[in-house]
Image (cartoon, rainbow, N blue to C red):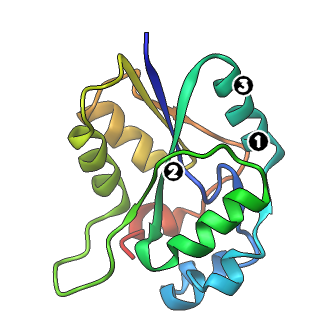
Amino acid sequence: MKKLALIDIDGVIADERHRTHYAEDKEWDKYFSPNRVGKDGVWVEGTELVSNLQEDGWDIAYLTGRREEIREATQSWLEEHNFPVGDLIMRPLPNDEPKVPLANFKVNTMLALPTLWDDVVLYDDDPEVIRLVKEKVGVNSAVHCTWHKKSEKLITEATA
C-alpha cells in the first residue's frame, strides 16, 4: 500500500515566528524574504512527525503556502535541516489572477494529485485548511498539527 504524507512547512516543520508579524500586516514580500525564511528554526515535533511517517513507509512531499519565488531558499532550508527529499509544491508566482485562499489552494492541489497512492494525508497547522480539506477531500485526509497556534488573522486572511 502506497501512502503519501503532504507536510506543510511554516508552523509544522519550520518555526517562522520571527517573521509572522509581517504576514499579519500583509507585508508578504518581507514575510517571504529568502533571507528571513533561511533563518527559520525547526519544530522538534515536526521533525519527529516526518521521521515517524518515513519509518512507517510514507512517501514525503511538502505542500506549502510559500510562493514559488522562494523555492531555492526553501529547498536549501529543508536540506540544511536534514528533511527528506520529496516533491515541493508551492504557490505559483503572483500574477494578475485573483489570489486564492490558502485552504482552497491546498484542496485544489490535493484533488489534482495523480492517483499513485492509496492514502494521501495533509499535515497542517491551519484549522481552516484542515476543515476544508476534510470537507472536500475526505474526513481522513488531514491531520491538525497543534504545536504552533496559528494567528486567527492568518487563518482567515492567508491569500498571499
Which x, y percent locates residue 114? 24, 34
Q: Amino acid at mark 1?
A: Thr
Which amino acid, by three-letter code, is at mark 2? Asp
**Direction from residue 134 to residue 99 in the image, left or right:** left
Question: Quick one: label 3 or label 1, which is nearer the N terminus?
Answer: 1
Above or below for 2 versus 120: above
Q: Secondary structure at mark 2?
A: loop
Please name whichever residue, 14 or 55, is drawn nearer the observer in this view of the structure: 55
Q: Residues within 10 Å of mark 1 (few under 14, many from 20)?
A: some
Classify 24 as above or below 141.
below
Image quadrant in which the N terminus is located: top left
Query: In this figure, which residue is indicated by the disc labeled 1?
Result: 47
Residue on which disc 2 sits: 126
Q: Could you give the CA–CA distance between mark 3 and mark 1, rounded to whole angstroms?
A: 9 Å
Position of residue 119 in the picture relative to residue 11 (left or right): left
Seen from the viewer's position, the closer of residues 82 and 150 is 82
Secondary structure beneath label 3 = helix
Q: Position of residue 101 (x, y in %)?
A: 31, 64
- Residue at the (83%, 45%) spot, across then down: 44
Query: What's the residue at 61%, 60% (across, down)?
Result: 10
| Residue 93 place in picture, x, y as percent | 33, 79
In terms of sequence position, does the residue under pointer 3 or pointer 2 come before the other?
3
The image shows residue 145, relative to residue 27, as above or below, that is above
- In contact (CB < 8 Å): disc 1 and disc 2: no
Residue plotted at (66% across, 41% down): 146
Along the horizontal axis of the image, is 29 left or right of 18? left
Q: Amino acid at mark 3?
A: Asn
- Structural distance between the alpha carbons of marks 1 and 2: 18 Å
Answer yes or no: do the residues labelled 3 and 1 have beta carbons within 8 Å?
no
Towards the viewer: 35 or 43: 35
Q: Which residue has dot 3 on it? A: 52
